Amino acid sequence: MVRVNFTPDDVARTRFTLTQAPLSDTVLAFIELRRAAAEGWRGRHVNPWLREARRRFPATARPLIDVLGPRPPWPDLFDAFTPDLMEALEVVRATPRATLRAELSVTCTGRGDRPPLWVRNLADGDKEELELVIRAFRDLHDAVVAPRRDSALVAFHADVAKRIPVLLEGGHEALLGSLHPKLRWRDDGLDRVGVNAEWDLGGKGLLIRPSAFWAGEPIFSLDPEGSRPNVLVYAAQPNGHPAAEDIRPDLAVGDSLAALLGPTRAAVLRALRGPRGTAELAAAVRISPASASEHAKVLRDAYLIETRREGRSVRHSLTALGRTILGHLPAASAEPGERSG
């Protein structure tokens, strides 16, 4: 198993990231596509956004097939967690030749095959081949990751909101153990079942990053040299993927909130800009009270709304997270309940 040892300084400096990492998400999205292809596009992890990503996949990103396989090991040289894509690609462009050779050698050896000539040239620091990789990541990001940015951001914030009560009630031990069944806290360290390695964090702590573009087991990106942060990436919940519902692609582009939640549930959330009872909510969205109650339960479980009892009735209202989502995602042109035409 992976054993990550924590000192008191490491515990004090372990925190959630507050920003997105577009290059990291692009890498994860690509690996998810490889995993789906390796399984013949069958299985429960193949969500609609992956099928749409397959359709949008740019030909210029095909060189990444020789660099990033569906299974580890994967090179760490693409683990740039800066929130700016161009800045992250500059970090890749500045990778020393020795690092390129070491990272790509481990990756190709771990996959048990001989790398193609262009990858061997890349490992030797060939500038043209490096630019080929940079273009591949940029085009893949623009085609696959950027269109899902809003729904991925919602999943990111919803997951962090879900973890905060766990941290407050149980501390870091409970928090880290809640991220995935294969993670557990034991004897001042974090264990991940299934891989054999041991690491120290060097007093820098661990940056915890949920990703809506990843559905696999947690991934550690640890830097013994101390030049970049130690990061733990795990699949954001409750979605696991952006826009995980079976939605129409045109709806995902035109209304990010409906793309994530579904049109009815998005209308329910928008209807709660002001507090409403269940009957009022049902009338505003033009659904049955039973359906309104069920949608409210789902939104409440995602920490987007809260429900208070007032006598024999209840009133639903937005949480701070729900208000933030409505403030940052494009709203529909019509008010909830209105019909065009």
Image (cartoon, rainbow, N blue to C red):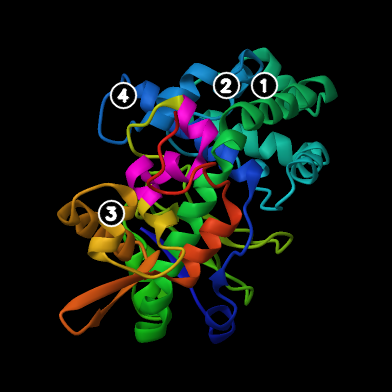
Q: Nearer the viewer, mark 2 or mark 3?
A: 3
Displayed quadrant of residue 94: top right
Q: Is residue 253 left or right of residue 275?
A: right
Chain part drawn in magenta: 250-267
The residue singled out by tag 3 in the image is: 283
Q: Is residue 232 visible?
A: no
Between tags 4 and 3, which lies in front?
Answer: 3
Residue furthest front as drawn: 341
Q: Which residue is mark 1?
A: 119
Inter-mark Cα distance, 2 to 3: 55 Å
- Amino acid type, residue under disc 2 in the picture: Asp
Which is more foreground, mark 1 or mark 3?
3
Asked if the residues shown at circle 1 and circle 2 are in contact, with their CB atoms under 8 angstroms apart, the answer is yes
Measure the C-alpha gap from mark 1 to mark 3.
61 Å
Q: CA distance from mark 1 to mark 2?
A: 7 Å
For the residue pair 8 and 61, the one nearer the viewer reads as 61
Closer mark to the observer between disc 4 and disc 1: 4
The three-letter amino acid code for the residue at tag 3 is: Ala
Decide which of tag 4 and tag 3 comes sooner along the chain: 4
- Looking at the rendered image, the quarter that the C terminus falls into is top left
Q: Residues within 10 Å of mark 4 (few under 14, many from 20)?
A: few
Q: Would you say 338 lies left or right of 299 here? A: right
Instruction: Kindly report the distance in space between the C-alpha atoms of the residues bearing marks 4 and 3.
Output: 45 Å
Q: Nearer the viewer, residue 23 or 339?
A: 339
Could you tell me which secondary element the residue under label 3 belongs to? helix
Disc 4 on helix, strand or loop? Answer: loop
Residue occupied by mark 2:
66
